[in-house]
């Protein structure tokens, strides 16, 4: 049941309605970088909030963390990134363009020539310098994953939160990878945001927890309205696994450009804590406060992309339909994710009484839900405009409202309208959104 919408349609809707813009567009744009506009910023925030709530606040065995992007360079020696986080690249000798070796066949994708340089390893970490000196001693990296911020804080979190195994640490934050070929809109970018969990377990229970996290994380997307038929699990083959990993399963979504990874859930064993213990010289063993048992925990890592989830929710929400012989584009976002919950619309903007009533309703509702007021078009156009950005409810104030103190509430998906007394509107809205 693939969504038949094209990426061009999604990209143009995102730009036209203020979800996502090309980065630095007035200067011609920066490849592989994107900016979230007013609606995109709200959508992305709602996704992160839903993730945090499900994975931190609603659980007994999780705590949060917000580590810095810049870390001690030794971190990346311990994690293996300095050595191994590379792509094999080749240069076309004719046109001088550079490609990933596994992306070229016999001939250059750009010019068709068949003469390449030898493949060379290219590290994907973005490098910068700290302080005034630009020498090798000042080199630091923009983190390529948020995970290491969790591992290096394992002892701090364990000591301050007094959690006993099994427990997890969750983090949302920016990461950076110098991708050679960013692409597919916001799917593969050089700067991206991750939602990562490192879940620490007894070694003997790691496999069971791996299974449970795969199920939990799959269900999270479904609970937020993603079409189950466009989601699947894909288990990595032996040849795809990192050398320290004993199992990884991806959650994939069927994008217009094909099945692609939203999130990976890996069993990282005790590799990371052992490495950091060795490189830092610190004791990173877990000591149980009750049993006095000492163990280096295994780690289950559900690692998802915020930008990828945002793109998938956008694609999945997109619907085109015919209503009374005219086309309607509607983003059927789950009500928790919709950037705008309620739009308040005056039927007649010439009537100052109607306008002030509508503005007062908006001011009152926005204390509880995200609201907009719009009077810049006819009511039919205003409805379509809100449908196209996924606004859940439209509240219309009309001349009759001044007489009977009722407003019309229209629901996005069914387009059904009900009359609600103004003094009950707020409780009606709050109930609708479960606030
Ligand atoms: Zn070429």
Image (spheres, grey):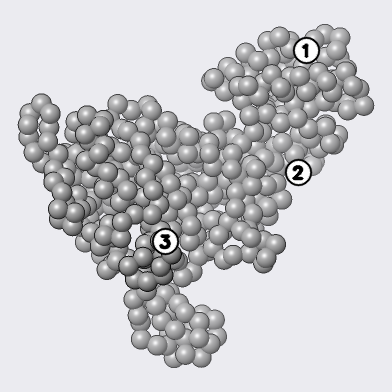
Tag 1 residue: 406
Residue displayed at 59% across by 43% down: 41
Left or right, residue 51 beside residue 407: left
* Quadrant (top left/top right/bottom left/bottom right) for the C terminus: top right
Q: Mark 2 points at which residue?
A: 327
Do the residues under discs 2 and 3 have CB atoms within 8 angstroms? Answer: no
Where is residue 36? Give x, y as percent. Answer: 60, 49
| 270 relative to 8 in the view: left or right | left
Mark found first going from the N terminus, 2 or 3: 3
N-terminal-most mark, 3 or 1: 3
- Residue 402 lies, in percent from the top left, at 85, 12
Mark 3 lies within 8 Å of ligand 1 (Cβ measured): no
Let me know if residue 319 appears in the view. no
Question: CB at mark 1 closer than 8 A to ligand 1?
Answer: no
Q: Determine which quarter of the picture holds residue 335.
A: top right
Q: Which of marks 3 and 1 is in front?
A: 3
Between 142 and 384, the residue placed more toward the observer is 142
User: Mark 3 falls on what kind of element?
Assistant: loop
Q: Where is residue 345 in the image (x, y as percent from the top left)?
A: 78, 27
Q: Nearer the viewer, residue 326 or 435?
A: 435
Farthest residue to the right: give it. Answer: 350
Left of 181 or right of it: where is 381?
Answer: right
Disc 2 CB within 8 Å of nearest ligand 1 atom: no
Which residue is tagged 3? 131
Question: Along the line of sight, which residue is nearer the eye, 46 or 385?
Answer: 46
> Of marks 1 and 2, which one's residue comes earlier in the chain?
2
Where disc 1 sits, the SS reads strand
Comparing marks 1 and 2, which lies closer to the viewer?
1
Q: What element carries label 2?
A: strand
């Amino acid at each position: 049941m693939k969504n038949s919408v094209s990426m061009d349609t999604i990209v143009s809707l995102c730009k036209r309605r203020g979800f996502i813009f090309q980065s630095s567009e007035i200067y011609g744009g920066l490849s592989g970088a994107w900016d979230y506009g007013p609606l995109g910023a709200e959508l992305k925030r709602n996704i992160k909030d839903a993730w945090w709530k499900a994975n931190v606040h609603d659980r007994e065995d999780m705590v949060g963390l917000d580590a810095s992007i810049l870390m001690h360079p030794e971190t990346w020696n311990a994690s293996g990134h300095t050595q191994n986080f590379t792509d094999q690249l080749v240069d076309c000798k004719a046109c001088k363009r550079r490609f990933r070796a596994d992306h070229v066949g016999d001939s250059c994708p750009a010019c068709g020539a068949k003469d390449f340089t030898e493949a060379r390893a290219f590290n994907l970490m973005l490098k910068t310098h700290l302080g005034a000196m630009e020498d090798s001693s000042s080199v630091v990296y923009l983190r390529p994953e948020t995970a290491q911020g969790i591992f290096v804080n394992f002892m701090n979190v364990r000591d301050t939160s007094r959690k006993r195994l099994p427990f997890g640490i969750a983090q949302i934050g920016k990461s950076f990878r110098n991708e050679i070929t960013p692409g597919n809109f916001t799917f593969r970018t050089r700067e991206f945001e991750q939602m990562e969990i490192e879940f620490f377990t007894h070694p003997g229970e790691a496999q069971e927890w791996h299974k449970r996290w795969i199920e939990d994380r799959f269900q999270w997307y479904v609970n937020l309205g993603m079409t189950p038929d466009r989601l699947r699990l894909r288990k990595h083959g032996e040849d795809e696994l990192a050398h320290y990993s004993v199992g990884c399963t991806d959650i994939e979504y069927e994008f217009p450009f094909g099945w692609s990874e939203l999130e990976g859930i890996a069993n990282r064993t005790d590799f990371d804590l052992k490495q950091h213990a060795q490189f830092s010289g610190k004791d990173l063993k877990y000591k149980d406060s009750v049993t006095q048992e000492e163990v280096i925990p295994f780690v289950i890592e559900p690692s998802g992309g915020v930008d990828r989830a945002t793109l998938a929710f956008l694609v999945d929400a997109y619907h085109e339909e015919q209503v009374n012989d005219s086309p309607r584009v509607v983003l059927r976002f789950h009500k928790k994710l919709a950037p705008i919950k309620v739009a308040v619309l005056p039927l007649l903007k010439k009537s100052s009484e109607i306008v002030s009533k509508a503005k007062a309703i908006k001011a009152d509702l926005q204390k509880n839900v995200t609201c907009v007021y719009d009077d810049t078009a006819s009511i039919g156009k205003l409805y379509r405009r809100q449908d196209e950005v996924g606004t859940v409810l439209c509240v219309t104030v009309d001349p009759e409202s001044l007489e009977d103190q009722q407003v019309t509430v229209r629901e996005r998906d069914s387009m059904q309208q009900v009359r609600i007394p103004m003094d009950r509107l707020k409780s009606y809205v709050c109930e609708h959104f479960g606030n």
